[in-house]
Amino acid sequence: MRVLVTGAGGFIGATLLQLLQQVGQVGPQRITRLAAMDRTLPALPDSVERIEGELQDAQVQSRLAQFGADLCFHLAAVPGGAAEADPALSRRVNLDATLDLFNLLAEGRTRGSAAPVVVYASTIAVYGTPLPDPVTPGTPTRPALIYGAHKRACEILLADATRRGVLDGRSLRLPGIVARPRAASGLVSAFMSELLHALAAGESVTLPVGPQATAWWMSAQRCAENLLHAATMDPMLDTQGHMERTWALPVLRLSMQEVVDTLSALFGVDGHALARYAPQEPVEAVFGRYPVLDDRIARRLGLRDDGTAAELVQRALAPYAIQAANPNSSSV
């Protein structure tokens, strides 16, 4: 099986690429060729083929077509805040280049072969604000950001390509994924990762939302595992919505206060003294009022959350070799 990961130099893409190298297969099929594509890529093993450059560049698209992926994990994107600041760039990358990628994957299919599988990293930003309580598989999508609007358009067109039999698409709506590196990411939701880093290091942090603000949380490791599982799951188990080919990932719905409590217990710090709150209404309206998510269908398909808040934190910080003072804490 030839497997392509776009956005492989990014936070989630790098985690997924590492997981694919570790397992060496997708379901029962062995990975015979693995390619990583991004604007810039770190040092990679010789076994991973490098495709470096902009997704919208003709030369990059030619190399992607030549690779002829049987399975593509499409994660390359301009993130939310950056997309909102530059709508034209978002259109070129998040919409136009993505649709070009779908087309070249479909056109590269050999006669009589199965349609290439495309696991598309979409976003909960497609729901917009305010959200009903609960959010269900039938909740209408009303994106409040151009990032969500472009992602929703690609969900629809990937489902249409699946209907026509030229691709086998699976769109996953990703929640807040932690813990991103402590650097500018272009994501307004980066404060969620900063909270984990700061309290684990015993540092103060100021959050743009209040202590009771709720968000949907997932570690990068669990996200990568869900993306890999999505490649082989049976969409027909979703008897009502499988034609839509879109699923919100199961989540842990946690308030900032619950996460602070968990970090305090795990790392032996006074999180209540370290965490400061300076709520910004526009930020809290979008990133701090997530209701209950009805994710029963996604769970039936085999997709999972992190289990507990403590497991979320430990899994999220593991890549940074941050050790909890009390790893057996059952807080929250």
Image (cartoon, helix red, strand yellow):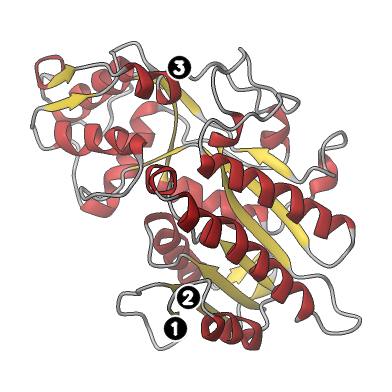
Q: Quadrant of residue 168?
A: bottom right
Where residue 270 sits: x, y (%)?
Answer: 10, 19
Q: Residues within 10 Å of mark 2 (few under 14, many from 20)?
A: many
The kind of secondary structure element at disc 1 is strand
Q: In this orientation, does residue 325 appear?
A: no
Residue 73 placement (x, y as % from top left) = 59, 63
Q: Quadrant of the C terminus?
A: top left
Q: From the image, which quarter does the N terminus lie in?
A: bottom right
Q: What count of labels does the image hold?
A: 3
Residue labelled with disc 3 = 289
Where residue 184 sits: x, y (%)? 24, 49
User: Residue 273 or 312: which is nearer the viewer?
Assistant: 273
How far apart, in angstroms, are the residues tagged by discs 1 and 3?
40 Å
Q: With respect to residue 7, does 183 lie above or below? A: above
Q: Quadrant of residue 31?
A: bottom right
Q: Which residue is mark 2?
A: 36
> Identity of the amino acid at label 1?
Arg
Q: Residue at x 21, y 29 (%)?
A: 266
Q: Please give the residue where the numbered disc 1 appears in the rendered image.
A: 50
Q: Amino acid at mark 2?
A: Ala
Left or right of 58? Residue 19 is: left
Residue 307 vs 291, above or below: the answer is below
* 42 with respect to 68 (left or right): left
